[in-house]
Amino acid sequence: MPESPDVKNDALRGASPTNGAPPAGGPHGPDDPAVPWRMYWAVVSGRRWVVLGTLAAVLLATVVYTYRVMPLYRASSRLLIEREGPKLLDVQEVFQVTEGWQNEYYQTQCKLLESPRIAERVFKRLDLWKEAPFANSADPIAAFLKCVRVQPVRNSRLVDLFVEHPDPAKAAAWADALVTEYIADTQERRTGLGREAQAQLKKEADEMRVQIDAQEKAIQAFREAHGLVSVNERQTLLERRLEELSSLATAAGKERRDLEAGQEKLAALVQEGAWDALFSLPQAQGNLLLQRMREEQVKLLQERQELLKSYREKHPRLLALQSRIDVIDESLKREAERVAAGMRAAYEEARTREAKSKETLEAAKEEKVQFDRDLIELGKLQREAEATRSLFANILKRVQETSVSAQFELTNISIVEKAKAPARPFSPNKPLNLALGLAAGLALGLAAAFLVEQLDPTIDSPEEAERVVGRALLGVIPHVSANGRKEAGRAGRREAAAGAVADAGPGAATGARGGAGGNGGGPGFSADLICHTDLKSHASEAFRAVRTAIHFAGARGAGTIRSLLVVSVAPLEGKTTAVLNIGIATAQAGHRVLLVDGDMRRPRLHRSLELPGTDRGLSDILAGRAALADVVQRTPVEGLDVVTAGPIPPNPSELLSSPRMAEFLEEALEKYDRVIFDSPPVGAVTDACVLAPSLDGVVQVIGHGRTSRHAVRHGRDQLVAFGATYLGAILNNVPVRRRRYGYGYGGYGYGYGYGYGSGGYYEQYGGYYGEDDEGK
């Protein structure tokens, strides 16, 4: 049957078609950035009594301490400590006592002010050995110094001295005595230091005098050994010589290059017989013999040209003339070769001269470099001697200064403010103590709240439930009770505030019994049928959202969920209430729904609906004693029928796994659109695990603040291991007022446990089938 418009509207209100689950009951989903802050606030709100109790205890302890502790008065004296006198300061700079001496000096003075040395002087001055605090003390000096505190004034040369004592007059007197004895001790040490410094300086002066003599002798010896007696004159001569040698080397190089090029070109032209080009060279133009021979050659060549106009090549006159021309050519060649040989000899001489010029130049340069090195070394010796002479002059000056300083007992310490007896106590600071107590109490309270929250093993938030089951919740059901219902906001929707939507006790029928699980309900109200009795409540809306979420969960999987099993790990988690209200919500959407009480150990559907439960029911069908039509019963909700458990059999698990169970389910699905089964807790017996694989899907109900994470995870894994189609979980009994984790509900739930058998979960829920509890 297609989904009705109501189901589609529910999808828009409470479920997302993309994930098949509602947004967990509130405007903020789990991925909302505001959720962590909501989580923190929810923890604080849920554990507010832990926070308030811790805060009250810390505040009480603070108040008791503040008003019972003995008051202390603080007297203060301010000193001006100048830098150590210039005479002695310069002495210490000469000796290079330490780096950053000034900072260390002020730190030292502060430590001296509160040192046992000064304290002992005060004891002798004021005869404090007999004072009550110190008479019986094992270490009176240490006890006295516990009352003293020295604090430098930042970015100044001022130092504050504080003395704390229950008697303000004694505090002031002790502070004045400390300052007086500190100044006296400083004067004594300065006088002794001046005499010692004078003796040390005289010794250093004698050593410096010997050192200066040795340095001056070393400088003179160095000048003589390296020819540096007249430095400027020698430097000028070296520079002039370098300049001349450089010019000579340059000229020799040019001459060598010119001769090299000329002789190579002359040799090539002679070899080629290029006489016209040869006689263009300066070497050929300056040779008279070559010139005459060239003129004779030109004359004979011209004569040959004239004869060729009249005679043939073989004519005797031409042949004779040609012989003369050949003789002239040979002579020219020999003379040219002689000139080329002369040029080669000149080239070799030029090359030798160039090499010697360069060698002489390099030697001069090396001499100049060595001269510069000697000058550097001489300068170094002279600077060292000058530094020694400067230091020697300073030492002589300090010897004179310390001689004068030793004659006077001057101090660089002065009193800026003398100590006065304080009018009001310094400690305890009541406003500060109370503020610190408040802050500490609040911090400890918050820490305790989060610690308690971490130690709580139960699931108490939708996000935590989603992490445990590994998927989004199908829905979050709020905490509801009859005597806690009230009008909530302008929409007039009634909220639940005091009890829980859990399984009701026996006889909790419409208009007859109290609230779920005995948690406060008056006559005329039952949480089991909230979707029928209070259509506009938050719980009804939540169950309709669950109905829609189940529908979309099926749409993502194998198809429409027609047969559904609702389970829980432990009793009293609201499983039966969820079965009833999901069935009612589904029937209100226009479907024909059959509720089946599959808990044949402790059935409860018939009590909530005020129907006969043990006469005839599911056990009769599975045992073959009745048919579906014989046991089905109508309910006050239109479209909703129920098959109760019937007589309790000795073997429920065997009946649920029998072939008749499959036949019953097939017949039920032919007559109804949806079949929803209630079942015993998974943690107690295996009935639900046996039944689950034959149905389209399984929904797990988790009791808020009741079920442990391990139990929920184990129950889920157990169902999946048996082959069940696990659709998701419903978090039940979420208190409305806490608005936890952005889901609209949160806080801490209710409940108590039961079990079956022994060992593991059976031991945990051992009382379930052994005693007659009213609800589950």
Image (cartoon, rainbow, N blue to C red):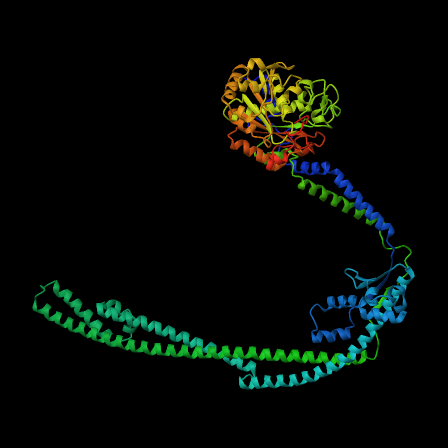
Identify which residue, 362 or 525, lies in the foreground: 525
Q: Quadrant of the C terminus?
A: top right
Identify which residue, 775 or 90, lies in the foreground: 775
- The answer to whether residue 191 shows anywhere in this view is yes
- The answer to whether residue 696 shows anywhere in this view is no
Relative to residue 182, is residue 480 depicted above or below? above
Tell me: 14 left or right of 339.
right
Furthest-front residue in this view: 650
Image spot of residue 62 (x, y percent): 82, 48
Relative to residue 709, is residue 238 depicted above or below? below
Image spot of residue 153 (x, y percent): 79, 60
Image spot of residue 67 (x, y percent): 87, 50
Q: How many marks?
A: 0
Image spot of residue 112 (x, y percent): 79, 68
Identify which residue, 619 or 323, lies in the foreground: 619
Relative to residue 343, is residue 702 depicted above or below? above
Identify which residue, 717 or 392, lies in the foreground: 717
* x 19%, y 71%: residue: 297
* x 65%, y 14%: residue: 636
Relative to residue 472, is residue 358 depicted above or below? below
User: Which image quadrant for residue 388?
Assistant: bottom right
Tell me: 137 left or right of 537.
right
User: Which image quadrant for residue 751?
Assistant: top right
